[in-house]
Every structure is written in structure tokens, then in C-alpha cells.
Amino acid sequence: MQTNTLRIWLAAITAVAALGGCSSTGKTPEALPSGTVSEGTVTATARVKAIDQQTRRVTLERHDGSLIKFRASDAVRNLPQVKVGDEVTAIFYESVAFQVKKAGDATLGTAVAGEVARAEAGDKPAVAGAKVTTVTTKITGFDKKAGTVTLQDEDGESVTIKVRHPENLERIAVGDMVEITRTEAIGISVATPSK
């Protein structure tokens, strides 16, 4: 049941921004709302302050002097290549996009795809991964006066949400599908700073 709640929550949050955040662009009334709801990249760097190869305990120091302590899991390849003073860079990217489609052009459900790549043996540790989650819900109703839309997931759970731009309700119909795509990517690398 928690998975269903997560699905409908994601659909609701995204659709609020999607249907509400996309204002009319002068396209014909047949054009269905779509676009990127949010997108952002966060980059963080830290310096290796201490490392114990036997216990795999690592201490990183951020630019503000705060410390991050953790045990590198056995999945971390090439830990012996890491030395005190090396720089660790982590980049996280996330975007949420949506597209309203006519009935028959999409299928209710959730699809998840992902991939992970690691550094070759003998290189400095590095990992990159991406996960794309697509949740497709169906519009089962909307109220132009109230500025709300009701979405239903594949398990029949429904949620009614308020849109920020009710004029977009003119561009949708009961039975249309809302396809929400969340993309997450992370890359972590270790490098010896150049002198």
C-alpha cells in the first residue's frame, strides 16, 4: 500500500506543478500541457582528511570545515587508490517533467529504468548512476470553477488536486493520461588535486 501512496503522491505533486505551472502559450486548444516542472543540479566537494584502509573508515572535510565520517562499503572499488588530500566530488541531478496524452496514447502504470557504472580496477574510485521513473495516471475528473483535477493510478486510487493555472483545464479532458517522468542521476569521483 505504501507504493501506491507514493505513486499517487508523486502524481499529485507533479500534476499540481505541471497542470498549474504551464500557462497558455498561444497554441491551439488541442495542444496538451507538457514541460519540465523542475530541474536542478547540486555539486558538492570535500577533501579526504583521513582514511583507514583496514576498517574502510573515511573522513571527509567540507569547505566550511565540517566533517563527514562513514565506512566505505565493500562495493566501493579501488579504495586503496584514495589518499589523504584527494578531492571527492559529488554531482546530483534531478528533473521532473510531465506530458498530458490522449487516452490510448499511454498506459496506466509505473516504469523504472536505471543504470550504474563504476571505475575500472586500478583507477580512483568513481561511480555514476541514473534512474528514470515514469508514473502514468488518468484524469478522471476536473472542476473548472474550483480549479481542481482528479487523477487515478493503476490501482484505482484517486487524488484531487488544485492547479495553479486553471486555464489549463481548458486543454484537458476526462480520460486523458498524465505521464510524469522523474529523472535522477548521481556521479561521485575522487581525484588527486593538481599542484
Image: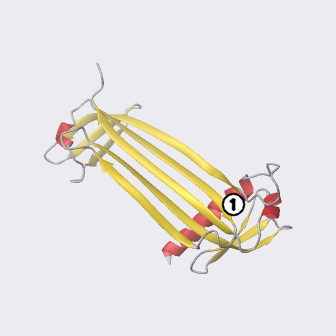
Q: Quadrant of the C terminus?
A: top left
Residue ranking furthest to the right: 145
- Relative horizontal placement of residue 122, taking residue 22 as reference (left or right): left
Left or right, 168 with respect to 72, comes to: right
Q: Position of residue 18 (x, y in %)?
A: 68, 57
- Identify the residue at image location x=57%, y=80%: 155
Q: Nearer the viewer, residue 44 or 58?
A: 44
**Vertical arrangement, residue 140 with respect to residue 115, above or below:** below
- Secondary structure under tag 1 reads helix
Residue 159 sits in quarter: bottom right
Name the residue: 77% across, 51% down: 23
Which residue is at the front of the view, 85 or 78? 78
- Residue 60, percent from left and from top: 31, 38
Identify the residue position indicated by label 1 in the image: 16
Q: Residues within 10 Å of mark 1 (few under 14, many from 20)?
A: many
Outermost residue on the left side: it is: 54
Question: Type of residue at label 1?
Answer: Val
* Rendering coords of residue 147 (x, y %): 80, 65
Residue at the image point whose x is 27% and y is 40% from the top: 59
